[in-house]
Each structure stands twice: as structure tokens, then as C-alpha cells.
Amino acid sequence: MKNLLMLFLVISVFSCKTNVETTVNKKSEKPNILLIVIDDQGYADFSPFKEHDKSISTPNITRLGKSGTVFTQAYVTAPVCSPSRAGILTGKNQFRWDKPASWGPGLPNNVKTIAEYLKEAGYETARIGKNDLGRNFHKYNVREYPLNHGYDEFLGFSAHAHDYWLSSNKIKERTPDPYGTSALLGPLMHNMGEKSYEEGYLTDILTDESIAYIKRKREKPFFLTLAYSAVHHLIHEVPKKYLDKYGAKEIPNYDPDSLMAFEKYKPGTYSAYYDKYSRVGAIKAEELRNYYLANLNCLDDNIGRVLDALKEQKLDKNTLIVFISDNGGSPLTGANNAPLTGGKYALWEGGIRVPLAISWAGNVAANKVETRYVSATDILPTLLNAAGMPVKDETLDGISLLKPDPNRLLVWKWQKTWAVRQGDWKLTNTNENHWKSEPSVQYIAPIVDNMELKLFNVETDPGERLDLAKKFPEKVKELEQAYVNWCEANIQQ
Ligand SMILES: [Ca+2]
């Protein structure tokens, strides 16, 4: 009898482990799904990784990571916001339809989103925060607007960035160019109208609204995409208590009456203010990271509030959470991508390898570090699988996050550059591209700045320090051909 009991225990433990690792939800109850998208977080600034930069303070992101599985080799489909977000949302490489592989892939009618699938699976859907698909900013009656691609509700902004402090009608009316750049200020878009906030800090506002959404009484499971704009520039815009903690001096907010004369812009424009503080120089390179740390710390406290709200509502056990940064840390904000080279704006590992975590109590292994490479396109099939929704689309690029394939082919196309990864190898023609100013001191410069083919073993050399193209010409040829073949078969002509 005792032996039988032991055998039963062993079998139970074993099958439990198997369930945890393969994760197909057999429960009839569908989980709530929370997809948290962060903006421009550095690879080394993700505390669930053992080798993270110790200057960050993000205990809540650590808590989230430990409650599930974190991925040390998670790739997004582009090194900047819009195309990467299109990849996350659709489970596809956005250059399938955006042949120039541009900043603005947009969202065609025939490409289905996670929100559309989950709505069909019986979910209530909402997007709170940044909606940035690179086209048709600030417009309601376009496919890119969340209400037209599967979300029942939207509160946020449709652009690359929004001022962290200025979300009122009043400031919009006083500003000569409220939509002057790819960033904006003023009221947030809210369903088919707007919502003005006289005061408040954007990261706090997005959290408050998300908590209110989570707390709502409902019959159906929810799918909430919470897309923070932190830690995108304007990185210096942070509540004072965080600035004080990191010894960062407060910088005055934008004010239309203040005279800021720059050659390119009229005095008093938001464009001038945004441009000034979205490059290194106005804030000294060596001081920039203090602002970044303050901004990230504030974001972390807000993520803690969301996690606490789920617990308080007793939803923590049946909510699947995915946490991802849309691209690597920016060279212009003081983010740290170490040991990866480069950053946002280019296909070096620092631009496309990002923090990623998935958590779902009892279904996804907790406290686990997955070192095999995965893609942000895997989020869609993973979520649909959890929701019990079959995926039939053969042009999907994603597979399950929980079953990584160590030999799969991943491809990237970003403007005139491209990259391909298969197994341990990465081939790329990427150059260095740190955009509009000198990079911050955290930036690790790539070994070369040209568009010749470079071959790296990114398993043993994630920092891409040793170009092996000359040593392994056959591997170069093989991977280049794999990239060409993929494009010929999949990019719409
Ligand atoms: Ca971004």
C-alpha cells in the first residue's frame, strides 16, 4: 500500500511537471490575459535576469519574472516601436506586408490581431496606453485605431510618444503644435472621443485606468493590453521623489510661453522641446542614466500596483501575464543593453533582443529561465493556445513560446538592413545607427560601422565582438540564401 502511494506520488509529480512545461490549458475556464508592453527597456535593465545592471531598482518586475518564465534570448521583429508592435500584435514579421520595412508598417485589413482572435474566443478586450503602428496617427476611423482591430475599448494615444505630464485640453489649446512631431501632448484618445487630465503623470494615469478596468465586474474573461510609454524619452519627465532618489535635477516641463529658440523650430513649439530632450546633450551623457533609473523605478512601482490589484481581486491565479519591451534600450536615454552591442534603431543584438517574461500560475513554470531563442511573434499563438483558440493561419511566423525550436529560422528586415538567425548563428549587414546625437555612456559601440556581411555565433558571443564571416564563408552563403528564400516566399510583391 505504502509502495503504491509512493508510486502515485511520483507519477503525480511527474505529470504535474510535464503540464507545467508544455502548457496547453485543459481547464474550461479561460484565463484573463494581461499583455504589458514596455518601451525601450535595456536588456541589462531587466532585473529577473541574473546578470542585470545592479543600479536599477525594479522589485516588482523581479516579482513578475520569478512568478513565471523569463527568456534570455527573446527577439522582437524590429529595433523601433511601430514595426515591432505590429509584429507583437499580429504574430507576423510586419515586413511581410511592409516591403520597405519602414517606421510605419500600418495594419492592413487582412492581417488579424491578437485582440480580434481573442474577441472571437469570447474575451472582453481593451488597450490602454501607447498605440503606435506607425501610420494614421491621431485618427479614429482607420484600421490602425484599436477600436478597428479588435479592441472593445481604448484609452491612450496613437503616436510614438506622449508627454508624461501634459494631458489636458488646456495645454493643448495653448500649444502651437500639439501634434508637432511624432510625439504629442494634450488629452488622451478615449474610444471615439477624448479624455482630458488636468494633472497627473502618464505612467500613473495608465495604471489607474488599468486597475479600474481590472476591477470591473464582468462575465467574460478580459484581454488587456497595457502599453506603457515608459521608458521612452522624454526620459527626464519623472515625479520628483524618483528624481531625488537618483540625484537627478528637475527640468522644467514644456511651457508654450517659454522661449526656446532653435534653428529648426519656432520658439515655444513642443517640437523644439521634444527635440531638445530626446537627444543626448541637453542632459549630459553621464547624467542621463539617473533620469532613466528614476523613470524605470516609477514604472516598476506602477507595475507593482497592477500586480497587487490582480491579487486583491483574486485574479492573480487565473491571469496570464506577458511582459515585453518593444525594442532594445535606446542609445539616447541612458538605457543599458550590456553585454549586447548597439541598441534601438539597428539590428545589432542590443536593438532586437529584449526583456520578455510570461507568467501563469500552475500553467507556466515559475522561477524558470529559458535560454533558447524565441520571438515576439510567438506571443500570439501562445495566448490563443491558452484561450483554447485554434490558429489556422499558415503565414503566422510565431510558434508557442513554451516550445522553443532551437533550429528555427528568424529573419529581420529593417530599412536597408537585414539579419537572419538560425541555431547559434546570426548573419547581418546591419550598420551602426544611433540616430540624432552621440549615444549615452552606457552604449556599447558595435565592432564596425558598415553594411558588409558579418557572421556571429551569438550563443557564445552575444556581444557580437568576433566577426566570423571570413572564417566560415559557407555558413555566410547558407544563411544569406535562407534569408533570400524566406523573402521570396513571404514578402508581398
Ligand atoms: Ca520602443
Image: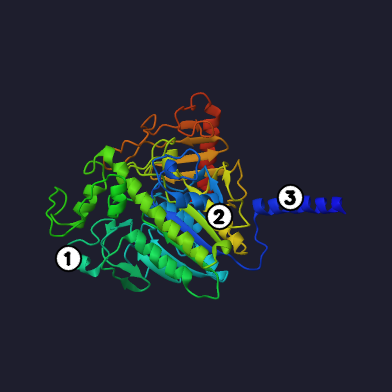
Work out whether residue 58 or residue 488 is closer to the camera in this orientation and state it.
58
Tell me which residue sits at (85%, 52%) in the image: 2
Numbered disc 3: secondary structure: helix
Query: What's the amino acid at mark 2?
Result: Ser
The crowding category of the residue bearing disc 1, from other C-alpha atoms within 10 Å (few below 14, some 14 to 19, many at least 20), is few
Distance between the alpha carbons at the discs numbered 2 and 3: 21 Å
**Colour scheme of the picture:** rainbow
Tell me which residue sits at (22%, 66%) in the image: 172
Q: Read off the residue under disc 1.
A: 174
Answer above or below: position of 225 versus 42: below
Work out whether residue 264 or residue 304 is closer to the camera in this orientation and state it.
304
Work out whether residue 206 or residue 157 is closer to the camera in this orientation and state it.
206
Work out whether residue 311 or residue 84 is closer to the camera in this orientation and state it.
311
> Quick one: label 2 or label 1, which is nearer the N terminus?
1
Q: Is residue 255 left or right of residue 341?
A: left
Q: Judge whether residue 391 can be spotted in this image.
A: no
Location of residue 120 in the rendering, given as x and y in whole percent from the top left corner: 55, 70
Q: Is residue 69 left or right of residue 55?
A: right
Location of residue 149 in the rendering, given as x and y in whole percent from the top left corner: 45, 67
Q: Read off the residue under disc 3.
A: 14
Q: Read off the residue under disc 2.
A: 359
Mark nearest the camera among 1 and 3 is 3
Query: What's the amino acid at mark 1?
Result: Arg
Q: Judge whether residue 61 can be spotted in this image.
A: yes
| Quadrant occupied by the N terminus | bottom right
Q: Quick one: which residue is furthest to the front in this view?
A: 2
Q: Is residue 115 left or right of residue 262?
A: right
Q: How many marks?
A: 3
Query: What's the amino acid at mark 3?
Result: Phe
Numbered disc 2: secondary structure: strand
> Quick one: label 2 or label 3, which is nearer the N terminus?
3
